[in-house]
Amino acid sequence: MTATTAEQASAPVTEDALRSVLLAGERPSRPGPVRTSLTFGWRALLKIKHVPEQLVDVTMFPIMFTLMFTYLFGGALAGSTQEYLQFLLPGILVQANVMITMNTGITLNTDIQKGVFDRFRSLPVWRPSPLVGALLGDLVRYSIGSAIVIALGLVLGFRPEGGAVGVALSVVLLLVFSFCLSWLWTMLSLILRTPNSVAGVSMMVMFPLTFGSNIFVDPKTMPAWLQAVVEVNPITHLATVVRGLMHGSVPAGEIGWVLVSSALLVAVFGPITMVLYRNKK
């Protein structure tokens, strides 16, 4: 280092010199809502990459439920396992996806407890983007779960009469509903204190909804009072739509009901979630 260089290094940096350096390049434009949401969605996928155990509920639970119900109860409920599989698999697809949505709230609550979301709220980005991004990242998890259930069903002998188009439409509708349902767990993650409490409350909600539906059996075999409860269950309508699309029928009224219920989930729990997020301390 020469004497001149040493003198320059030790000289104080003036405000004008610092300003000239900062203004030398073009200032990047502020990212928009879509870009920031996709960035946080990519973060959610990177978390799966580094913690692959998060995919246990996506992979093992659907496989376990499909095999267990098909071969333990299929003969008793439908006379043969193959016949029951045609009825069961669309329902298992619904159950797997709606149960997976609970992980959204658990993951967000974990980030909140670690203080990560305090940092996110201080960033100059669209305020809902961390929440929306997490939900978008979970759509990949739902897609993986759907693919595993359908692939397993095809191996076991499931044959959808609606073909590839019917299967694809049912999965798209299922992803829409799952995304909207996730706002409920996002709200709970901002209210409850620990990830375990989020998981416990979510299970208390989802178990009656999934088992008190037409996922596993036809409601006609149930008592009249229970049929009335099952008929108003949104999971019942979702399973009916998925089952109909996969087997070649298009229940237009049921599809409309599912879309309306999806919109209501976002309309009710979305604003509440954002208020809680904004006021979270």
Image: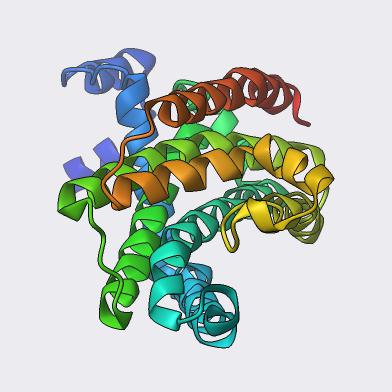
Identity of the residue drawn at 48% across and 76% down: 66
Q: Quadrant of residue 48?
A: bottom left
Q: Residue furthest bottom?
A: 72
Q: Quadrant of residue 174?
A: top left
The picture places residue 214, in percent across and down from the top left corner, at 59, 53
Front residue of this view, candidates 203 and 169: 169
- How many marks the image carries: the answer is 0
185 versus 271 height, above or below: below
Would you say 271 lies left or right of 263 here?
Answer: right
Front residue of this view, candidates 278 and 102: 102
Front residue of this view, candidates 33 and 138: 138
235 versus 88 height, above or below: above
Would you say 144 lies left or right of 117 here?
Answer: left
User: Can I make out residue 134 in this image?
Assistant: no
Identity of the residue drawn at 50% across and 79% down: 79
Identity of the residue drawn at 31% across and 22% down: 31
Would you say 84 lies left or right of 19 here?
Answer: right
2 versus 132 height, above or below: below
Identity of the residue drawn at 30% across and 52% down: 247
The picture places residue 189, in percent across and down from the top left corner, at 71, 43
The picture places residue 55, in percent across and down from the top left corner, at 46, 70
User: Can I make out residue 32 in this image?
Assistant: yes
119 versus 154 height, above or below: above
Would you say 275 lies left or right of 179 here?
Answer: right
Of the 4 image quadrants, the one containing the C terminus is: top right
The picture places residue 76, in percent across and down from the top left corner, at 60, 81
